[in-house]
Amino acid sequence: MDDRPQNSDMTRDRATQLASRRREVQTQLDEVEQELTALRRTREGASDDDEHDPDGVPLSEQWSRLEGLRLARTEALAGIDEAMARLERGEDGLCRHCGKPIAPARLAVRPEVTTCIDCAP
Ligand SMILES: [Zn+2]
């Protein structure tokens, strides 16, 4: 017998869930970064006229959309890493602000959250 807590199965499931979520978000982040790289090349090759093409979505608009996605995914990754670290310390599923348990339904939808609904930014 080892001295693992009784919820070790739950902990293992949660670790698996976080790891697969991490891979998923990392893949999405890679895709956004590839799009940003492609867009950067397009922008470097574009003249001022292209920038003001009335028919197309302005490059600057595409840029800010992708930057927004990149930021959101980077934050999600950081959240997952934090959740994994908290899992190792046995603090997983507890709000990092108030220490109350985070609703399981909330964790199921967004495994990376580290705050309860009341403390969500
Ligand atoms: Zn809270």
Image (tube, grey):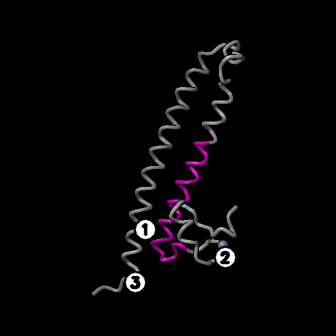
Side of 66 relative to 20 (left or right): right
Query: Looking at the image, is mark 3 or mark 2 earlier in the sequence?
Result: 3
- Camera-near label (1 vs 3) is 1
Q: Are marks 2 and 1 in contact (CB under 8 Å)?
A: no
Look at the numbered disc 2 and say if its residue's Cβ is closer than 8 Å to ligand 1.
Answer: yes
Q: Rounded to the nearest whole Å, what is the CA distance between mark 2 and mark 1?
A: 21 Å
Displayed-image quarter of ligand 1: bottom right
Magenta span of residues: 69-93
Verify whether residue 75 appears in magenta.
yes
Q: Are marks 1 and 3 in contact (CB under 8 Å)?
A: no
User: Which residue lies under the disc numbered 1?
Assistant: 14
User: Which residue lies under the disc numbered 3?
Assistant: 5
> What amino acid is found at the position of numbered circle 3 in the picture?
Pro
Q: Are marks 3 and 2 in contact (CB under 8 Å)?
A: no
Query: Looking at the image, is mark 2 or mark 1 earlier in the sequence?
Result: 1
Toward the front, the furthest residue is 105
Q: Secondary structure at mark 1?
A: helix
Q: Position of residue 91 (x, y in %)?
A: 52, 76
User: Which residue lies under the disc numbered 2?
Assistant: 98
